[in-house]
Image (spheres, rainbow, N blue to C red):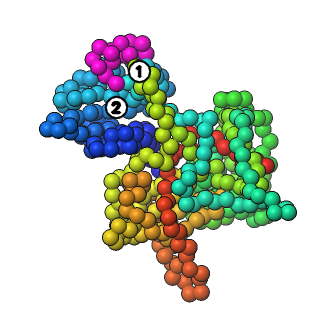
């Protein structure tokens, strides 16, 4: 996964790419020793234009000083157009500076009132509950309601060592469900026995479930934490608003995306983009490298490219509490929706996952691995809370 700052920058770069189709759009480019979040180059006839974009992921409104500093940086590199984008809005002084110097000011946000399943998603992990008399599948999203989110889970062992559970939703769900105690209970069932008061909205409360006597636990693998004797589960309970999912089907919540809203603060004009339509990745993937996609979160290994077709191995994707692995083919033009994995620790895990997958595929008598075809566009971020509820 990538940081929230990088993700937002890539989203803004994707917006520039789909709205200026004849332009060259680059994320994180250095011009004469100065770094710019997004750079757009285009030409009209014999004329060449350079647009530079600053993206700020912040809660506070941008000040006049921030705008002035970026103006100086951009004009030192002979930019023809200067654009400032933030999630936190602008102070009145910043608006005045922008008008004076003809600077474009935008805000970027995700519309939490319009969650949707991407039309092009191929890995839809949907499980039908009991259906009677031929009833059709039904799915609806309820109104915001106060829910308790459990975050920052930490396992404390009898030897004094502590291990953090993955904080990504689908990963946490898998390890909470698949990690078993000697008495047969899952880690999720153990945690469900914790008694604590529900937090108020936006309240964060540290909690501890002490286990006396300690309980031996065994995870499905040891990529995140080892088997051992568990003496306590430490966590934080957070009160947040979430949208319940109702119906006779079960859908992994991290499949949902939110529309991106891009607003020109000086003109008032607003634009909305489906998240999956934005090319937030690289222009082309490379064989032998690992990549990440979102919604659902999945990690891929690029096996090779032949003609216009990329062969992928999905080496790690957790959906509805299960580990999904598969091989698939896809047109190379969709490379722009995959993000390169650069974190060394994550790369080591993915290399081991790939070796596990290859070993499993090579075992005699094993069923053939599923081959998924079609447009696979799993990307996006999950900036809101969902809960599966009947």
Judged from this view, the residue extending furthest toward the front is: 45
User: Which residue is rendered at x = 63% and y = 60% of the image?
Assistant: 125
Instruction: Describe the element under mark 1 as helix, strand or loop.
Output: loop
- In this picture, residue 134 sits left or right of residue 152: right
Q: Quadrant of residue 57?
A: top left
- For the question of whether residue 329 can be seen, the reply is yes
- For the question of whether residue 167 can be seen, the reply is no
- In this picture, residue 78 sits left or right of residue 149: left
The disc at residue 54 is 2
Residues tagged 2 and 1 counted as in contact (Cβ below 8 A)? no
Judged from this view, the residue extending furthest toward the right is: 133
Relative image position of residue 264 (x, y in whole percent): 42, 25
Determine if the magenta segment contains residue 17. no
User: Which residue is rendered at x = 69% and y = 48% of the image?
Assistant: 233
Relative image position of residue 89 (x, y in whole percent): 46, 23
User: Which residue is rendered at x = 78% and y = 45% of the image?
Assistant: 194
Relative image position of residue 333 (x, y in whole percent): 37, 58
Looking at the image, residue 267 lies above or below residue 289 = above
For disc 2, the neighbor class at 10 Å (few under 14, some 14 to 19, many from 20) is many
Earlier-in-chain disc, 2 versus 1: 2
- Span of residues in magenta: 91-104
Which residue, given by chain and number where applicable, does mark 1 sit on?
A: 267
Determine if the magenta segment contains residue 96. yes
Instruction: Describe the element under mark 2 as helix, strand or loop.
Output: strand
Q: Quadrant of residue 124?
A: bottom right
Dominant secondary structure (helix, strand or loop) of the stretch shown in magenta: helix
Judged from this view, the residue extending furthest toward the bottom is: 364
């Amino acid at each position: 996964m990538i940081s929230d700052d990088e993700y937002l920058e890539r989203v803004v770069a994707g917006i520039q790419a789909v709205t200026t189709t004849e332009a060259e759009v680059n994320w994180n480019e250095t011009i004469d020793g100065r770094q710019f979040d997004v750079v757009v180059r285009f030409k009209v006839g014999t004329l060449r234009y350079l647009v530079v974009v600053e993206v700020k992921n912040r809660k506070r409104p941008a000040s006049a000083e921030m705008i002035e500093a970026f103006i100086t940086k951009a004009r030192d590199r002979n930019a023809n157009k200067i654009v400032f984008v933030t999630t936190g809005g602008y102070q009145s002084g910043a608006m005045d500076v922008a008008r004076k110097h003809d600077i474009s000011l935008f805000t970027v946000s995700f519309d939490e009132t319009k969650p949707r399943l991407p039309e092009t998603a191929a890995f839809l992990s949907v499980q039908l509950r009991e259906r009677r008399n031929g009833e059709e599948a039904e799915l609806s999203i309820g109104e915001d309601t106060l829910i308790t989110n459990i975050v920052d889970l930490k396992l404390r062992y009898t030897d004094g060592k502590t291990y953090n559970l993955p904080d990504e939703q689908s990963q946490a769900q898998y390890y909470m469900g698949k990690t078993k105690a000697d008495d047969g209970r899952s880690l999720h069932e153990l945690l469900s026995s914790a008694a604590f008061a529900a937090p108020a909205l936006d309240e964060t409360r540290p909690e501890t479930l002490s286990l006396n006597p300690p309980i031996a636990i065994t995870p499905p693998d040891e990529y995140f934490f080892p088997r051992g004797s568990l003496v306590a589960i430490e966590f934080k309970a957070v009160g947040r608003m979430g949208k319940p999912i109702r119906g006779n089907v079960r859908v992994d919540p991290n499949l949902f995306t939110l529309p991106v809203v891009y607003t020109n603060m000086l003109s008032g004009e607003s634009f909305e983009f489906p998240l999956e339509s934005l090319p937030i990745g690289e222009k082309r993937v490379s064989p032998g490298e690992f990549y990440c996609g979102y919604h659902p979160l999945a990690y891929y290994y690029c096996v090779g490219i032949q003609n216009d077709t990329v062969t992928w191995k999905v080496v790690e994707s957790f959906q509805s509490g299960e580990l999904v692995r598969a091989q698939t083919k896809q047109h190379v033009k969709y490379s722009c929706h995959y993000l390169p994995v650069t974190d060394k620790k994550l790369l080591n895990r993915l290399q081991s996952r790939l070796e596990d997958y290859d070993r499993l595929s090579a075992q005699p008598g094993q069923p053939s691995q599923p081959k998924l075809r079609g447009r696979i566009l799993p990307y996006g971020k999950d900036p809101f809370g969902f809960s599966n509820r009947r």
